[in-house]
Amino acid sequence: MTMKSLLRRPADALLGPVMGSVMSVRTRSRQVVLTFDDGPLPGSTEPLATVLADHNAQATFFMLLTRARRSPGLVGELVQAGHEVALHGLDHRRVTTLPRHDLAPWLRDARAELEDIAGVPVRWFRPPHGAQSPRSRLAASAAGLTTVLWSGTTWDWKDVSHEERVARAMRDAVPGAILLAHDGAADASDLATEEAVGGVDKVALLSEVLTGLEERDLSAVSLGTALTTGTPVRRLSFSH
């Protein structure tokens, strides 16, 4: 354990329940929370949903409103398939770059419109890039949203080999983990400032990860499902 993590523990214990973001789930169930960002994206989201169905798996999709507006039917298909809809943002700008007076309406209006498109309540928010400040964290709470980050990743956003991605995901896949993956790829139309890594076989990656989970007697579920029997683990996490 590093000195940084030792020093952070008292702060997490004191401020985590109020200012912390959900990083994982404390649970006795053999469940891993699978999450997807930056979608929905026609041609990418559907094949991933098929793989999820083949493995009887659930996921939480953190959607960009810019994307949901273009593919409302796809949003509905995910809901009908039993997946959970969450907010990734009105667009892909870092919330830490937004003017103070824009934060609350940016979150509130995006949540309301996504709920209209999906036809279901939206409870969770994951800030683009995981970047947030205490001010944006409080603004999310004021908008009725719980901020969710992650404890593990599939590295589908990083320029590494397929084998490294699978290995990283399986290393992080422990009961209660929240795994980060992407069904979409934010671009300039979403006001993204960084280009997504290309050439990632997300279908093969998801298939191998889900098979690996099954071999460990772990199931992939949405955050909402995991929290029916578990409790959220909140930690302070602020970055630009």
Image (cartoon, rainbow, N blue to C red):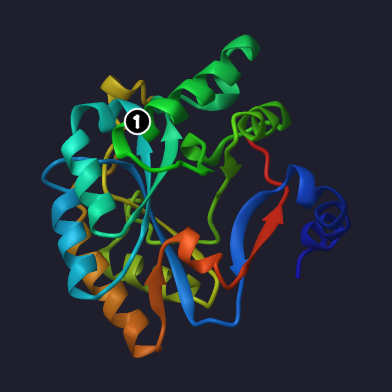
Q: Residue at x 51, y 77 (%)?
A: 174
Q: Position of residue 211 (x, y in %)?
A: 27, 80
Which residue in the protein does label 1 denote? Answer: 116
Q: Residue at x 46, y 71 (%)?
A: 32
Q: Which element type, helix, strand or loop, lies under badge 1?
A: helix
Q: Is residue 112 visible?
A: yes
For the N terminus, the image quarter is bottom right
Q: Position of residue 13 (x, y in %)?
A: 84, 57
Asked whether 236 or 225 is in front, the reply is 225
Q: Is residue 201 visible?
A: no
From the viewer's perspective, is 109 left or right of 142? left
Q: Residue at x 55, y 71 (%)?
A: 176
Which residue type does callout 1 highlight?
Asp
- Vertical side of 195 occupied by 42: above or below: below
State which quadrant residue 130 falls in. Answer: top right
From the viewer's perspective, is 127 left or right of 233? left
Numbered circles on residues, count: 1
| Disc 1 crowd, CA 10 A, few/some/many (<14, 14-19, 20+) | few
Q: Residue at x 60, y 35 (%)?
A: 144
Q: Position of residue 93 (x, y in %)?
A: 45, 24
Q: Position of residue 205 (x, y in %)?
A: 24, 66
